[in-house]
Image (cartoon, rainbow, N blue to C red):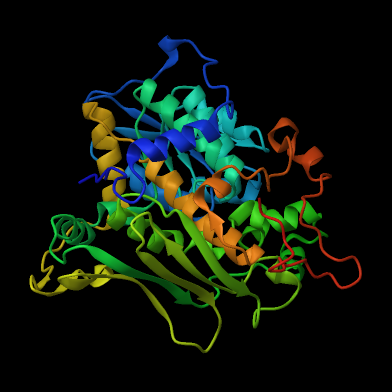
Amino acid sequence: MNQNTPMNPSLSRRGFLSSTTKAAAGASLLAGLPIERFVLGASPSDTVKVALIGCGGRGSGAANQALSTDGSVKLVAAADVHPDRLNGAISNLSKAHKDKVDIKKENLFLGFDGYKKAIAMADVVILATPPGFRPMQFEEAVRQGKHVFMEKPVCVDAPGFRKVMAAAQEAKKKNLKVGVGLQRHHQAGYLETMKRLHDGAIGDVVAMRAYWNGNTPWVRRRDELEKQYGRKLTEMEYQLRNWYYFVWLCGDHIAEQHIHNLDVINWVKKGPPVSARGNGGCETRKGKDYGEIFDHHVVEFTYADGSVCFSQCRHQQGCWNDVSESVIGTKGKSDLGRYTITGENAWRFKGGGKDAYQQEHDDLFAAIRNDTPFNEAEYGAASSMTSVLGRMATYSGKEITWEQAINSQVDTMVANIDKVSFEEAMQLMPKSLPDPETGLYKLAIPGVTTVI
C-alpha cells in the first residue's frame, strides 16, 4: 500500500532533485563502511532485528507497531538521553511483546552518542527522538547500512534538509528501505482519494486549503519536572524534556504537526511549493514554559503552476478547531480527510482499511523482507522543508522562495552535540536561552528576524 508519488508538475522531480542535490553537495560523508556491512534485505523467514532510538511515547508506539508486523522480529537495542524514558519504554514493550523484546542490559545506551551504538546492533532502526536530531541520526543509520523508519518531521532547518537529502540518495545506492511517519500515505481513504484526484476527477487543481487548528498538545513545566526528579534541571535537560517548545528540537508546531496537512497538499501537487509568505506570532500562549515557538501561523504557499495553498495552524484555547485538507478544481472539489469528491464526479470512500500507523510499518517490513523498492525519504524531506519554509516566512515576515529556503545557512542545532557525553553536553547551552531576569525566551520578530 506504499504510495511513492513522483514530484511532478509543480516542481518537477528532475528539477527538485537537481536543486536539492546541489544544495546537499558536501553535506555528509556516508561512505565510511564497507559494502559487506550493508543490510540489503531479509527473507520472509529471517528474524529482523530492530533498534529504537528515542524512547518517548511516539518511539514506543512505533516500536510496538514494528513488533506487530508479520514474521519474526525482535527489539535488540535502544538508546535515549533520559534513563527513565529508556527503562520505561523497554519495560512496557516487554510486557506487550514478551517474546519479541530481547535486549541485553549492555545494549541499552544512554547519551547523545548512544544512537550510534544501538544502530550497530540492528537491521532496522526506528528514529523517534525530538526532530532536530533526525538528520544526523538518519545519516549515521545510512552510513552503517541500516533500513530506517523515522518519524516526521525529518528536519527542522535547511542544513538538516540538505543532510537528509544527501543521505536519501546514499540509501538508494545501498538499497536501503526508508519509511517516514507521514502515515496518510498508507491510509486507504487517502490513497483512493488521491488516486482519483491524480486521475482528473476534479480537473485541474487551482486552489488548496490546509488546517491544523487546535489546542496546545502538551507542556512539561520546569517546576513540575524539578519536583518529579527532586533536583534542579540544567537548561539543556529542561529543553530536552520540554522539547516541543524549542525550534532547534521541534521546528515549531508548523513543522511538528502541520507537516501532515502540508504533506497532503504536496502529494496533490506532486511536489513542494516554489515560495511562501505569511504571518504569525504568539498572542495567547505566554509564559516561561512555552519556549520560543509561535501559537499561530498563517501562510500562503504558491506552487509552480500559480495555484495557492492557504495554510493555517494554531494553538489557541477557546477557538474553532479543524484539522483537514481540501482542494478546489475546475470540475469539482475534494475534502481529502473525509475522502469525498463533489462536482461532476461526486464520490465518497466507503471502504475500511487497517490503522495507518500499523500499515506504514507493515509496508516497510514487507519491503525489507521481499526486497521491493521503498524509500520515502525524499518526499518526507520535501514536506518537512515545506513546513520549515512556512516558518521562515512567518518568522521573517518576508516572502521566501524554495531556493532561498533550501540554501539557507541558518543552523539551529547545537554544534557537535553527539561528540560529547550527556553529562558534558548538559554544560552546553543551546542557542535558545531564557532572559536571565524574566525567564522568558525570545520570540522571532517579523520584519527583524533573519532566516536566510
The answer to which of 386 and 307 lies nearer the viewer is 307
User: Percent from the top left, x then y, of residue 318?
Assistant: 52, 89
Left or right: 292, with 265 as reference point:
right
Left or right: 23, with 329 as reference point:
right
Res 104 seen here: no
The answer to which of 28 and 15 lies nearer the viewer is 15
The answer to which of 84 and 274 lies nearer the viewer is 274
Q: Quadrant of residue 189?
A: bottom left
Q: Is residue 437 above or below residue 374?
A: below
What residue occupies the far bottom of the structure in this picture? Answer: 318
What residue occupies the far right of the structure in this picture? Answer: 437
User: Percent from the top left, x then y, of residue 363?
Assistant: 25, 42
Res 410 seen here: yes
Tag count: 0
The answer to which of 162 and 23 lies nearer the viewer is 23
Residue drawn at point x = 30 percent, y = 23 percent = 41
What residue occupies the far front of the structure in this picture? Answer: 306
Residue drawn at point x = 66 percent, y = 67 percent = 220
Residue drawn at point x = 40 percent, y = 51 percent = 272
Q: Is residue 381 above or below residue 368?
A: below
Left or right: 372, with 351 as reference point:
right
User: Percent from the top left, x then y, of residue 288?
Assistant: 76, 72
Residue drawn at point x = 67 percent, y = 38 percent = 112
Q: Quadrant of residue 446?
A: bottom right
Q: Is residue 376 above or below residue 190?
A: above
User: Percent from the top left, x then y, of residue 72?
Assistant: 28, 32
